[in-house]
Amino acid sequence: MKLPVIKKLVETYTLEQCEEAEQQMLEGLEPGIEVEGKDEGERLTHVLGAIEILKTIKSENKDPRIAVREFFERVRNSISS
């Protein structure tokens, strides 16, 4: 999971585009958006992270930078626990 890749997805694509990319990837298709990553698993992880952040931005009307920071704090905390 790479912060710059997820940030780029959040800044570049809509929630709907990321959700569509997720569905395409789950069906074994190439996503309709550019998703960086070393393999399919990492690419899907990046899309899922972007979706979670975009949902937070939309539902809580949060600044994207704050939503990204909070997401990565949750990830760090879950790894260190």
Image (tube, rainbow, N blue to C red):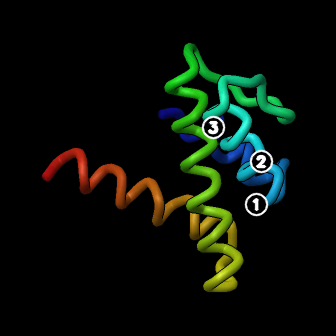
Residue 72 in picture, x, y percent from top left? 44, 54
**In-front residue for pair 21/62:** 21
Residue 67 in picture, x, y percent from top left? 57, 68
**In-front residue for pair 22/39:** 22
Q: Nearer the viewer, mark 3 or mark 2?
A: 2
| Rendered view: 79 above or below 39 | below
Residue type at mark 1 is: Leu
| Rendered view: 22 above or below 28 | below
Comes first in the chain, label 1 or label 3: 3
Query: Would residue 31 be found to the left or right of residue 23 on screen?
Result: right
Q: Which residue is mark 1?
A: 15
- As measured in the structure, the alpha-carbon distance from the residue carrying label 1 to the one carrying label 3 is 17 Å
Query: Would residue 66 be found to the left or right of residue 8 on screen?
Result: left
| Rendered view: 66 above or below 50 | below
Residue type at mark 2 is: Glu
> For mark 2, does the 10 Å Cα neighbourhood hold few (<14), some (14 to 19), or many (20 or more) residues?
some
Residue 68, image quadrant: bottom right
Q: Residue at x 60, y 28 (%)?
A: 43
Q: Secondary structure at mark 3?
A: helix
What is the number of the mark on residue 34?
A: none
What is the number of the mark on residue 20?
A: 2
Q: Secondary structure at mark 1?
A: helix
What is the number of the mark on residue 4?
A: 3
Q: Secondary structure at mark 2?
A: helix
Residue that lies at the very extreme toward the front in this rendered image: 27
**In-front residue for pair 70/46:** 46
Q: Residue at x 55, y 15 (%)?
A: 39
Q: Nearer the viewer, mark 1 or mark 2?
A: 2
Residues tagged 3 and 2 counted as in contact (Cβ below 8 A): no
**In-front residue for pair 78/33:** 33
Q: Residue at x 35, y 60 (%)?
A: 74
